[in-house]
Amino acid sequence: MWLQKTQEVVQMNLDTNKVKIFSGRAGVYLARRIAESFGVDLGASSVVDFEDGEFQTSYDESVRGATVFIVQSTFPPSDNLMELLLMIDAAKRASAYKIVAVIPYFGWARQDRKDKPRVSIGARLVADMLGVAGIDRMMTMDLHADQIQGFFSIPVDHVYASSIFLPFIRSLAIDRLAIAAPDMGGAKRASTYAKALDCPVIICHKSREKANSISSMTAIGEVEGKNIIILDDMIDTAGTITTAADMMMSQGAASVRAVATHALFSGKAYERVAESSLCEVIITDTIPLSEKHEKFTGKIKILSVADLFADIIGKVYANKSISSTFIM
């Protein structure tokens, strides 16, 4: 599907000499695929590290008058965000015509509001820093909270992974399918998928004693005999999805899979997935997987977002509508 769309981008007669795709060090794995799908070479850039931990970014080719797309997800450590900010500043000072930050995974998105006194709103702070650095537009995928788009005063292309996940789920041809939300906050996303797939919804209700620690979980909806797909925007420690999977299997589910856009896989996430009742975990490549992934490939399937972002980059540059991308 995306190959056909990428061919359509080529047919737009774009001046690819004026489109340059670069990457920070943490985004090379994906940026190279995006550039290849778009039909250009990944731009040459470099980073000089100083002994005290400071670093300096630079472009090794001219960007004067070009529309520059910088690919970098801002997952931990915070150096990834700082490197992106420096690359934006360098492009601005090198007379780039426009600068677009392509941030497949937007970090700090869980800090979208004050949920208790005397805490920061990290997502707003990051949005302000990106704006001050000099971006003209931002592209991202499956924000943890949709309202984060309102923190920016520039256009934000919020892409949904449903355009990748829904065709894949349909290709599995699963009988007695049900979509599950791992918590109340994911109910809207799960309902949208369930409507598209014409299947029931299950809502998991969990209570926490502290962050990344679940004290109890129950399921609302019919579980017995169902082949369930737990849907989420990210997997961090994998505590939620593995607890939900084990709980639903104990209640008579036929099978449980997990589908999530961003695979943070912090702490013992890989071990939890391996030891859980999950038969499969489907993720995207918005975040590079660690070396641990090689030990757990049996349960984890990766779907690439490269063709999707290449398609959107082409349409944005050509001032074409991208609304067809927004399935949700």
Image (cartoon, rainbow, N blue to C red):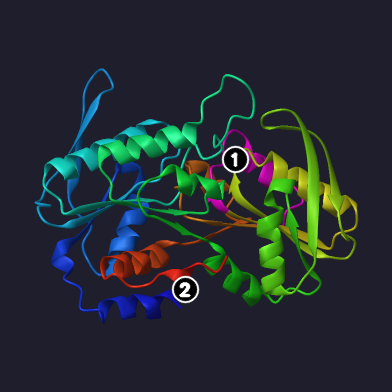
- Disc 1 residue type (three-letter): Asp
Residue on which disc 2 sits: 324
Mark closer to the observer (1, 2): 2
Q: Residue at x 37, y 66 (%)?
A: 312
Q: Quadrant of residue 189?
A: bottom right
- Disc 2 residue type (three-letter): Ser
Instruction: Give the camera-side residue of 207 and 268.
Output: 207
Instruction: Give the camera-side residue of 210 and 185.
Output: 185
Q: Residue at x 26, y 77 (%)?
A: 10
Circle 1 SS class: loop
Residue 314, percent from left and from top:
30, 69
Residue 242, percent from left and from top:
73, 45
Residue 201, percent from left and from top:
78, 62
Q: Residue at x 53, y 47 (%)?
A: 147
Task: Give the residues drawn in magenta, as a range.
Answer: 261-280
Q: Where's the C terminus, which quadrant?
A: bottom right
Looking at the rendered structure, which numbered label has been put on residue 236?
A: 1
Q: Is residue 242 above or below residue 300?
A: above
Circle 2 SS class: helix
Q: Is residue 206 left or right of residue 118?
A: right
Asked whether 138 falls inside the magenta stretch, the response is no
In this orientation, does residue 200 appear? yes
Q: Quadrant of residue 59?
A: top left
